[in-house]
Image (cartoon, helix red, strand yellow):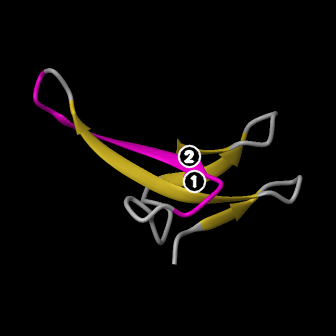
């Protein structure tokens, strides 16, 4: 089951990730929220060291914990 987050407006978003390779050959992981669960890349939990925050417009984002 994908990790879900409900914002203050009551809309539900699901956490996903994708991995890509940079020009220098390093692996980079991108985390994003989507309104629907996609077959590939859905995550069951928030990655270690991150927390969910909400922007002014109500979109959820991941931020590194301080």
Res 49 quadrant in image: bottom left
Judge from the rendering whether residue 27 lies leftward or rightward of residue 39; answer left or right: left
Q: Report helix, strand or loop for mark 2.
A: strand
Res 28 quadrant in image: top left
Give the residues in magenta: 24-37
Asked if 11 appears above or below 54 in the picture, the reply is: below
Q: Earlier in the sequence, mark 1 or mark 2?
A: 1
Task: Verify whether residue 12 appears in magenta.
Answer: no
Identified at 15% across, 33% down, the residue is 26
Asked if 2 appears above or below 48 in the picture, the reply is: below
Front-lying residue, 10 or 53? 10
Q: Position of residue 37 (x, y in %)?
A: 55, 64
Residue 5: mark in rendering: none
Residue closest to the far right:
9
Res 22 quadrant in image: top left
The residue where tag 1 is placed is 51
Front-lying residue, 29 or 66? 29
Q: Position of residue 14 (x, y in %)?
A: 59, 60
Give the CA separation, mark 1 to mark 2.
Answer: 6 Å
Judge from the rendering whether residue 30 lies leftward or rightward of residue 25; answer left or right: right
The residue where tag 2 is placed is 62
Identified at 56% across, 46% down, the residue is 62
Identified at 74% across, 37% down, the residue is 55
Marks 1,2: beta carbons within 8 A: yes
Label 1 neighbour load within 10 Å: few <14, some 14-19, many 20+ = few
Q: Position of residue 42 (x, y in %)?
A: 44, 63
Q: Report helix, strand or loop for mark 1.
A: strand
Residue closest to the far top:
23
Identified at 81% across, 35% down, the residue is 57
Judge from the rendering whether residue 49 lies leftward or rightward of residue 18; answer left or right: right
Residue 66 visible here: no
């Amino acid at each position: 089951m994908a990790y879900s987050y409900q914002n203050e407006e009551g809309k539900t978003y699901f956490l996903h990730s994708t991995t890509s390779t940079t020009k220098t050959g390093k692996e980079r992981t991108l985390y994003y929220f989507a309104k629907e669960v996609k077959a590939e890349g859905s995550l069951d939990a928030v990655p270690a060291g991150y927390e969910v925050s909400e922007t002014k417009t109500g979109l959820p984002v991941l931020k590194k914990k301080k």
